[in-house]
Image (spheres, rainbow, N blue to C red):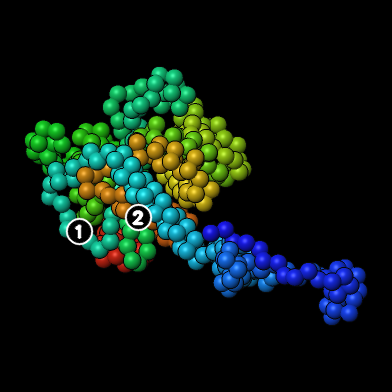
Amino acid sequence: MMRQVRRGPATPPNQGGGYGPGPSAPPYGGGVPHQPSYTDGQGYDDGYDSGYNTGHVYGAPGGGPGGPEGPDGYGRPRPNWRRRIKWTAITVVSVLVVTTIGTYFWADGKLRREVDLSKVIDRPESGDGTNYLIVGSDSREGLSSADKKALHTGSAEGKRTDSMMILHVGSSGDTLISLPRDSDVVIPTYQGSESGKTYQGRGQHMKLNAAYATDGPTLLVRAIEFNTGLHIDHYVEIGFAGFAGIVDAVGGVDITIDKAFKDKYSGADFQAGEQTLNGEEALAFVRTRHAFAASDLQRTKNQQKFLAALAHQVATPGTILNPFKFYPTMGAGLDSLIVDKDMSLWDLGSMFFAMKGVNGGDGTSMNMPISGSTGGNLVWDKAKVKTLVNELNNDEKVTVSGD
């Protein structure tokens, strides 16, 4: 039913009902007329209070500002900041997990696991720690004629080793050993990587890089293990294109060159001082040997120096945290890396950070000890090599030094 307004009896003039003063005026002098009340339409007051007289507002039962329904008094609940923070954190973590997993499978799928170390015969026993054989080859794979000309690679068929290093990762410190490509080694009996045929060794002495040229990575591993007694656990190889691509993807590498030099064969033309090398210049720097008297030994030193600078550049937050640099750098490297079939991304990461640490001064960096030369080949110091291998196999601190 419609509620009706019940009005009281008329108030005589000047008895408090008007606006002027009177004997019945309210104590505060307001002269406010009596307010109506609501009834049920039949003249009975059912106790309903519109809230008009008490200051309550329609739609906000329970009070005005600061009432129990909310801080604003209009029925809106207070923001639950704990809940918001919780769900924001869950969302961020979920995105990071999905991105990490996606990146892992993307990177793992790019690794070219092409080297089967199970084909290497008569292997020495594994020692403590992990030994990586890191090879830079002169493979022209992926290079156009214009690229070959710009990079001064030539157009020779096949591929040979331009650099070889053994990286030992262990609990007593990591050690990086450069193996000169002109090292004098004995080619032992081996099993052909493609034919599976066994080729008998005849005690023939050759340069170490000739082993790779003869039958690729597996014979190179076989020759190193036979001539050192050191077990190689993993193999990593990168060609010209991949190396230059990584340097360009990271935006160039800063390096200080101690002395100016030129080499028409590699295309090197450097002034002394600090400078930033792009991919083409970096390749010329690590390949140059004709500009030095001790050609192969100086080149290995330059290679170690440049790898230190490259590792430092790649591992900076500006590269790792910037997806526009991180993914192109990873893509350029992984697309051109050739590894053994048992290599995992974890192994690859361990190798990279160990190399970064060694070149940063946290480990030992050296050349294989040399005692002299014969027929243009560099002869290893057998006594020092034996001590070095024993220390690596037992994961002891290396005491041997090399030039």
Classify residue 225 as left or right of residue 137. left
Inspect this view and state whether residue 213 appears: yes
Residue depicted at 55% across the width and 44% down the height: 255
Q: Quadrant of residue 294?
A: top left
Picture quadrant where residue 332 is located = top left
Q: Nearer the viewer, residue 222 or 42?
A: 42
Residue drawn 45% across and 27% down? Answer: 151
Q: Which element type, helix, strand or loop, lies under badge 2?
A: helix
Q: Residue 126 carries which label?
A: 1
Asked if one can make out residue 372 in the rendered structure from this viewpoint, the answer is no
In the picture, measured across the screen, residue 198 lies left or right of residue 352, that is left
Question: Residue 116 location in percent, x, y?
Answer: 18, 42
Near-viewer residue (213 or 33):
33
Query: Residue 146's x, y, as percent?
Result: 44, 19
Q: Distance between the residues labelled 1 and 2?
A: 18 Å
Tag 1, which secondary structure? loop
Q: Which of marks 1 and 2 is nearer the N terminus?
A: 1
Residue lying at 75% horizontally and 70% vertically, measured from the top left = 9
Q: Which three-letter amino acid code belongs to the residue tagged 2?
A: Ser
Residue 55: x and y in percent read 68, 69
Check residue 251 in the rendering and tell me which mark sits there, or answer none. Answer: none
Seen in the image, is 8 located left or right of residue 215?
right
Q: Residue lying at the far top in this picture: please name it.
A: 145
Would you name the residue on which mark 2 appears? 350
- Across and down, in percent, residue 395 comes to 29, 65
Q: How many labels does the image show?
A: 2
* Mark 1 Cα-neighbour bin, 10 Å: few <14, some 14–19, many ≥20: some
User: Residue, x 17% and y 58% (percent of image)?
Assistant: 125
Image height check: is 212 above or below 15? above
